[in-house]
Structures are given as structure tokens and as C-alpha cells.
Amino acid sequence: MSRRSEQRRDAAFILYEAEIAGAPVSDLLERGAGSLTRSLVHAADDRSEQLDEIIGRYAIDWRVERIAMLERCIMRVALVEMLYPDAVPSDSPIPPAGAIDAAVEVSKEYCGAQSPAFINGILNAAMVEIEESEPADE
């Protein structure tokens, strides 16, 4: 797993722990957390309601509250990279498909058997919306 992938995973777990413990994310960020982890955590935490609204829009027949918290946190991290690339320090921004692939890989390791397909479907639907809303290159 690359360092960047590890930081994405760490961000999802910090968000998850904050949700479960009801603790501020700043209390859970360790001194050793990389800048990508910190940025992803803060951006996802600041925009959690908006990100959950996007997740809910594509989670057909599922209320966001019923989606496993870790799955939600993994999708929040991916959506931050997809929607807010300026919020993430990077000398080479990741394309939306790369953020989706990273989220699916984390879910394969840490979530249930159905999670990767579920996460992939929601994030792909969001990616289509993002691409359709971007102005066409002239």
C-alpha cells in the first residue's frame, strides 16, 4: 500500500473513530498524521452533512443513517478528493476514478463482502454528476 493510500485509510479511520466516540477530529489526529491525512479529515469533517447528502442521493433504497459508518467515512474521504481537490495538498491531484479505486480497495480490506460494490456504485454515480456539471473544454 502506498503512503498516499495509507493516509486515505488513516483519514477514514479517524473520521470513523470520531463518529463512534463523539470526539472532535482534532483530538484524534496524532502528531504523526501526514498532511494528506490531516487535510482529508478536516475537509470531510467540515463538509460531512453535504457529503452525506451526496451519498444519500445515490444510495438507492438506503437511508444514509443505515449505511455502515466505516463505509460512509471511506466514501466521505473519496468525495473530498473528487469534489474539493484544492482542499488536499498534492503535487499531483488524483482523478476521480483514482479516488474511487482507492476507496474500493480500503473497503475490500476492512468492510463486508458487499461493501466494495456498494461504495463503487455510489461513488461512480457521483463522478458522473461531477463530470456532467463541469464546463466542457473549448
Image (cartoon, rainbow, N blue to C red):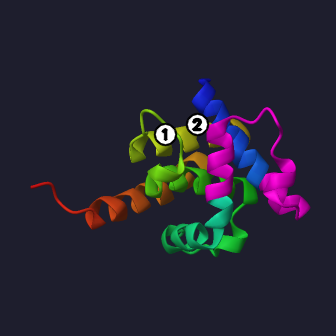
Q: In which quarter of the image is the N terminus?
A: top right
Neighbour tally class for label 1: few under 14, some 14-19, many 20 plus, Cα within 10 Å: some
- Name the element at disc 2: helix
Label 1: state its secondary structure.
Answer: helix
The answer to whether residue 119 is above or below residue 35 is below
Locate the C terminus by quadrant. Answer: bottom left
For the residues bearing labels 1 and 2, Cβ distance under 8 angstroms? yes
Residue 17 colored in magenta in the image: yes
Left or right of 28 in this view: 91: left
Q: Which residue is drawn at 62% across and 49% down?
A: 40
State the residue at coordinates (61%, 67%). 47
How far from the left and from the top, in percent, is residue 22?
A: 88, 65
> Label 1 is placed on what type of residue?
Asp
Q: Name the residue under label 2.
A: 105
* Left or right: 15 as drawn, with respect to 56: right
Q: Residue 91 carries which label?
A: none
Range of magenta residues: 16-43
Q: In this view, does 127 lie to the left or right of 110?
A: left
| Residue 94 visible within the image | yes
Q: Is residue 11 above or below residue 75?
A: above
What kind of residue is marked 2?
Glu
Q: Which of 124 and 2 is in front in this view?
A: 2
Identify the residue at horizontal 49%, vertical 69% (top origin). 58
> Image quarter for residue 24?
bottom right
Q: Position of residue 20 (x, y in %)?
A: 86, 60
The mark found on residue 101 in the picture is 1
